[in-house]
Image (cartoon, helix red, strand yellow):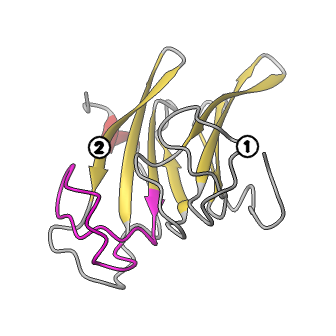
Amino acid sequence: MQIARDYFGHSLSLSEDGNTLAVGVGSEDSAATGINGDENDNTREGTGAVYIFVRTGSSWQQQAYIKASLTDRRDGFGLGLALSADGDTLAVGAYGEDSNADGVDGDQLDNSAENAGAVYLFTRTDNSWVQQAYLKASRTVMQVIFSARIWLSREMVKDWP
């Protein structure tokens, strides 16, 4: 459910064929996690979300509502995002994410690195989206804002499982 100041459309990414659109809502307030959780929950300020829309012919429909695997206040999930050329890989930045984890799939529960940022990678098979990775800098530092801008090139994801 959209409410005032969610900023639906703050970030956008369209697949190369024009059939998949990712829409970032970095100030969305749901405490839901993962894929297709409760969009009507507005209990956690500024966690952020990404909506995936797909086109069939001339019709568009929502395919997924995507959240971080752990939602904390003011994470800003979705303020930066990018779709691969084929629309099957999505990178989502959460510039305000506070985990002190390092590298790939670290512990998200230690929130001692304020605004260190994170990137979440998702992939689509058929019509289903799943989280593939949770990425942090190799040396997490407070206030670095890792993930503010994201871009995926075709070469980056063509051989990725």
- Name the image quarter holding residue 58: top right
Look at the picture and state if 74 lies above or below 158.
Answer: below
Q: Work out whether residue 101 can be spotted.
A: yes
Point out residue 82 in the picture as x, y percentages from the top left corner. Answer: 50, 50
Tell me the residue at 68%/47% (across/down).
41
Tag 2: Cα neighbours inside 10 Å, few (<14), some, or many (≥20)? some
Q: Nearer the viewer, residue 156 or 68?
A: 68
Look at the picture and state if 15 lies above or below 49.
Answer: above
Point out the stretch of residues depicted in magenta. Answer: 93-116
* Amino acid type of the residue that numbered disc 1 sits on in the rendered structure: Asn
- Name the image quarter holding residue 119: bottom left
Question: Which marked residue is nearer to the observer: mark 2 or mark 1?
Answer: 1
Point out residue 25 in the picture as x, y percentages from the top left corner. Answer: 66, 56
Tell me the residue at 25%/66% (across/down).
110
Residue 37 on the magenta segment: no
Does residue 156 appear to the left or right of 78 in the view shown?
left
Does residue 24 appear to the left or right of 72 in the view shown?
right
Point out residue 1 in the picture as x, y percentages from the top left corner. Answer: 78, 45
Residue 55 marker? none
- N-terminal of the two: label 2 or label 1? 1
Tell me the residue at 36%/71% (across/down).
98
Does residue 118 appear to the left or right of 78 in the view shown?
left
* Amino acid type of the residue that numbered disc 2 sits on in the rendered structure: Ala
The quadrant in which the C terminus is found is top left
- Residue hosting label 2: 133
- Residue hosting label 1: 40
